[in-house]
Amino acid sequence: MPPYVSLTGFSDDMASWEKLNSILMPVQQLANDLADTTMQAGSESYVAALSYYNSVKQAAKMSIPGSKPIYEELKQRFSANGNRSVSGSGE
């Protein structure tokens, strides 16, 4: 060991790193699992909402009473989703 490196300080730092790392790894795995679950839940809820929107859209086309105002409100949310452009892709 070079004289400017404290063996005690080095040992303390390594012990701290090992303890922290043993906590960090499971926490990171939990965060990754939570992100995956959140993404899946969001995807499933979007599919359900889109299905509802499409059924209301069909009802409005068929002039089912009360469907037109619901369709017009939902249309504002869903119509823009299909027309997104990818920025920064060089297109």
Image (tube, grey):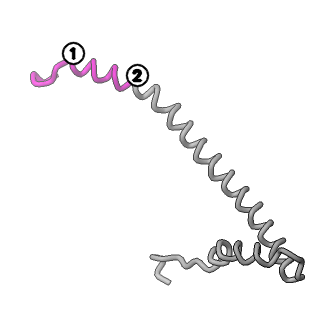
Q: Residues within 10 Å of mark 2 (few under 14, many from 20)?
A: few
x then y, percent, for residue 39? 63, 53
Tag 1, which secondary structure? helix
Please state if 65 lies on the left or on the right of 2 as rendered.
right
Please state if 45 lies on the left or on the right of 3 as rendered.
right
Residue range of the region highlighted in magenta in the rendering: 1-18
Please state if 75 lies on the left or on the right of 84 as rendered.
right
Q: How crowded is mark 1: few (under 14 residues within 10 Å), some or many (20 or more)?
A: few
Which amino acid is tagged 1? Thr
**Residue lying at the far left of the rendered structure:** 3
Please state if 12 lies on the left or on the right of 43 as rendered.
left
Residue at position x 27%, y 18% from top? 11
When the figure is inspected, residue 38 is found, relative to residue 81, above or below; the finding is above
What is the count of numbered marks? 2
When the figure is inspected, residue 2 is found, relative to residue 72, above or below; the finding is above
Question: Does 25 lie within the magenta span?
Answer: no
- Mark carried by residue 19: 2
* Residue 58, image quadrant: bottom right
* Residue 1, image quadrant: top left
According to the image, label 1 marks what residue? Answer: 8
x then y, percent, for residue 50? 75, 67
